[in-house]
């Protein structure tokens, strides 16, 4: 006996399976978005397990204008040489419970 696609789509188990798959995909997309755009807000035990997000430590660009003034920006200048700067986001961060020195 051949079942039509109409009969298969009315099967409650098939509908439940598709809904579960959609929910899992939605949760995975939400988690990836959270990791990419706000990695510093993730719980510490999760941050330790995941690779660092590209948004967690964006590069900065150091360059001088025509008058010789030093600039540091998040976008490189188009018309002059620049140096790419990368900083460790965990530098100068004290462990929990440690008060800064005076």
Image: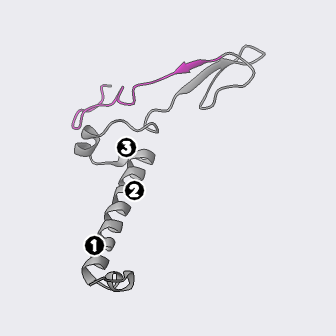
Label 3 to label 1: alpha-carbon separation? 34 Å
Q: Where is residue 57 in the image (x, y as percent from the top left)?
A: 45, 32
Q: Quadrant of residue 68 in the image?
A: top right
Residue closer to the observer: 59 or 6:
6
Picture quarter with the C terminus = top left
Q: Name the mark on residue 69.
A: none
Q: Which of marks 3 and 1 is nearer the N terminus?
A: 1
Q: Which of marks 2 and 1 is nearer the N terminus?
A: 1
Residue closer to the observer: 66 or 11:
11
Asked if labels 2 and 3 touch by Cβ distance under 8 angstroms, the answer is no
State yes or no: residue 93 in magenta.
yes
Q: Which residue sits at x=77%, y=15%? A: 67
Q: Where is residue 42 in the image (x, y as percent from the top left)?
A: 32, 48
Picture quarter with the N terminus = bottom left
Q: In this view, does 13 lie above or below 86?
A: below
* Circle 2: element type: helix
Residue closer to the observer: 15 or 51:
15
Q: Which of marks 3 and 2 is nearer the N terminus?
A: 2
Q: Which residue sits at x=37%, y=43%? A: 40
Magenta residue span: 82-101
Label 3 Cα crowd, 10 Å radius (few <14 / some 14-19 / many 20+): some
- Judge left or right: residue 30 versus residue 14: right
Label 3 to label 2: alpha-carbon separation? 18 Å
Asked if labels 1 and 3 touch by Cβ distance under 8 angstroms, the answer is no
Q: Where is residue 13 in the image (x, y as percent from the top left)?
A: 24, 79
Q: Name the mark on residue 29.
A: 2
State yes or no: residue 90 in magenta.
yes
* Circle 1: element type: helix
Label 1 Cα crowd, 10 Å radius (few <14 / some 14-19 / many 20+): few
* Circle 3: element type: helix
């Amino acid at each position: 006996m051949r079942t039509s696609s109409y009969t298969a789509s009315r099967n409650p188990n098939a509908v439940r399976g598709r809904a579960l798959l959609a929910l899992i995909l939605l949760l995975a997309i939400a988690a990836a978005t959270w990791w990419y755009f706000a990695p510093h807000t993730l719980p510490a035990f999760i941050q330790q397990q995941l690779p660092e997000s590209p948004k967690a430590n964006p590069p900065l660009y150091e360059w001088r204008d025509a008058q010789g003034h030093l600039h540091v920006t998040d976008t490189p200048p188009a018309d002059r040489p620049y140096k790419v700067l990368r900083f460790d986001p965990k530098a100068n961060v004290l462990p929990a419970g440690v008060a800064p020195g005076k």
